[in-house]
Image (cartoon, helix red, strand yellow):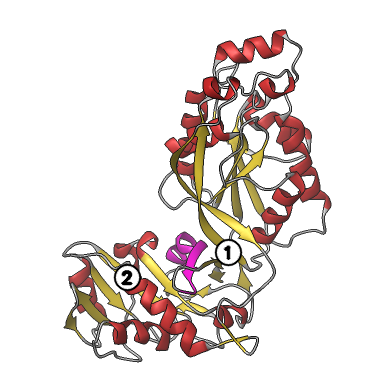
């Protein structure tokens, strides 16, 4: 079979009025009154130019083999710019023409784009826009901010448009990209104009951090596989939830988690654990489905070296019916950075026996690779 990958879907929401106030000394752009005053003073929007720089550099770089789909908002919130640059975006949210966009439009647009399904949500604006995006963001959705505002104290922005373009390319090409939780902070604009910086914590987003491959745990310059497995297991056990049934799959890394729980592990099977108690060892497909129907379930799987398959090689107990019942959002993947670096194709393959399920499972996953360390890894299709 020839491996293939589904399109990488990027959502784009632009706040076309971001940064207006900074050009004319207003220390911010939140609110219609400030925006009107900024325009009166001669301020020019800058968000379009910043996003144009990202998109131009993204398209001008060497061709990416994987297809990319852009989902966006009509008009100045994204579609106009994409189409001007030759992209053919999917319009997932329509903005009423003839009026400036508002914070409510940003929130509604983000909800619509994420509801349509995106691997990465890109927004252009400042801290105020980040706050609006967070208000409608599903838990765990990967986000990247293009810095266009006056206030940018949040940790969710790329350094500049060029850096944003590099991160996009790394994600699409399935390069080694880490994922971290970054704070969204917002400044009291009235206090800011009075010379006081009063930043408050508003929430957190999951953001990509592209970098060269660096070992998380080093001994003599190389990752120690057993030590990395211990760190993964310790971090996972610390975050396990009460009254959730865990289905622990095959492999040594998952087995290390079982060892931290002081429970025996079926190295080539699937064990069922709830509240620290082993409910079933080396369970078959029907038994696992019975457990999955009884309440909240997490499926914990490792990465087997060599073939690069997440499902379909050596874990057939994890049937399509079971995986569909559990849902991709409840699949936890554990793997050391060394194991991930050895993937033959750079991403994980799927062969559940159900092609529709394989397509629905494809996407970016947060893979725990240390105590509190995650890498973003593409799970693709085998077709």
Quadrant location of the C terminus?
A: bottom right
169 and 214: which is toward the camera: 214
* Residue located at (51% from left, 25% from top): 103
132 and 305: which is toward the camera: 132
242 and 66: which is toward the camera: 242
Q: Is residue 187 left or right of residue 60?
A: left
The residue that label 2 is drawn on is 238
Q: Secondary structure at mark 1?
A: strand
Within 10 Å of disc 1 (Cα), the crowding (few <14, some 14-19, many 20+) is many
Quadrant location of the N terminus?
A: bottom right
* Residue located at (28% from left, 75% from top): 247
Q: Is residue 318 above or below residue 124?
A: below
Q: Is residue 85 left or right of residue 265?
A: right
Q: Is residue 362 magenta?
A: yes
> Where is residue 183 drawn, in percent x and y?
50, 46
The residue that label 1 is drawn on is 178
**Disc 1 or 2, which lies upstream in sequence?**
1
Q: Residue furthest front?
A: 195
> Where is residue 86 drawn, in percent x and y?
78, 39
Count of numbered marks? 2
> Where is residue 282 drawn, in percent x and y?
25, 88
* Residue located at (55% from left, 67% from top): 377
> Where is residue 2 drawn, in percent x and y?
63, 76
Mark whose residue sits in front, 1 or 2: 2
Within 10 Å of disc 2 (Cα), the crowding (few <14, some 14-19, many 20+) is few
Q: Identify the magenta region.
A: 355-370
Q: Is residue 102 visible?
A: no
Q: Is residue 217 above or below residue 55?
A: below
Q: Residue furthest top?
A: 40
Q: Secondary structure at mark 2?
A: helix
How far separated are the C-alphas under marks 1 and 2? 21 Å
Q: Is residue 210 magenta?
A: no
């Amino acid at each position: 079979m020839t491996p293939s990958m589904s399109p990488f879907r990027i959502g784009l929401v632009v706040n076309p009025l971001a940064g207006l106030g900074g050009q004319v000394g207003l220390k911010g752009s939140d609110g219609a009154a400030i925006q009107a005053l900024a325009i009166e003073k001669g301020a020019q929007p800058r968000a379009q130019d910043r996003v144009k720089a990202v998109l131009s550099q993204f398209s001008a770089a060497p061709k990416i083999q994987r297809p990319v789909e852009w989902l966006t908002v009509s008009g100045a919130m994204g579609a106009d710019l994409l189409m001007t640059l030759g992209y053919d975006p999917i319009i997932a949210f329509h903005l009423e023409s003839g009026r400036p966009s508002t914070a409510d439009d940003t929130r509604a647009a983000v909800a619509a784009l994420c509801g349509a399904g995106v691997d990465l949500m890109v927004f252009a604006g400042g801290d105020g826009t980040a706050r609006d995006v967070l208000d409608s963001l599903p838990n765990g959705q990967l986000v990247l901010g293009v810095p266009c505002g006056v206030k940018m104290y949040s940790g969710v922005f790329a350094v500049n448009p060029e850096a944003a373009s590099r991160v996009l390319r790394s994600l699409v090409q399935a390069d080694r990209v880490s994922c971290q939780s970054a704070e969204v902070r917002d400044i009291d604009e009235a206090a800011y104009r009075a010379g006081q910086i009063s930043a408050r914590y508003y929430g957190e987003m999951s953001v990509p951090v592209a970098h060269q491959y660096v070992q998380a745990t080093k001994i003599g310059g190389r990752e120690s596989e057993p030590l990395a497995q211990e760190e993964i297991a310790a971090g996972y056990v610390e975050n396990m939830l009460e009254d959730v049934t865990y289905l622990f799959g095959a492999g040594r890394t998952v087995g290390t988690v079982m060892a931290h729980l002081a429970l025996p592990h079926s190295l080539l099977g699937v064990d069922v654990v709830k509240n620290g108690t082993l409910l079933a060892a080396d369970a078959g497909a029907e038994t696992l489905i019975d457990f999955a129907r009884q309440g909240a379930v997490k499926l914990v799987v490792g990465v087997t070296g060599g073939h690069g398959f997440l499902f379909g090689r050596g874990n057939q107990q994890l049937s399509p019916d079971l995986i569909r019942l559990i849902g991709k959002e409840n699949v936890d993947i554990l793997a050391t950075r060394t194991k991930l670096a050895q993937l033959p194709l750079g991403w994980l393959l799927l062969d559940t026996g159900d092609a529709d399920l394989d397509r629905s499972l494809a996407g970016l996953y947060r893979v725990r690779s240390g105590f509190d360390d995650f890498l973003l890894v593409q799970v693709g299709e085998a077709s």
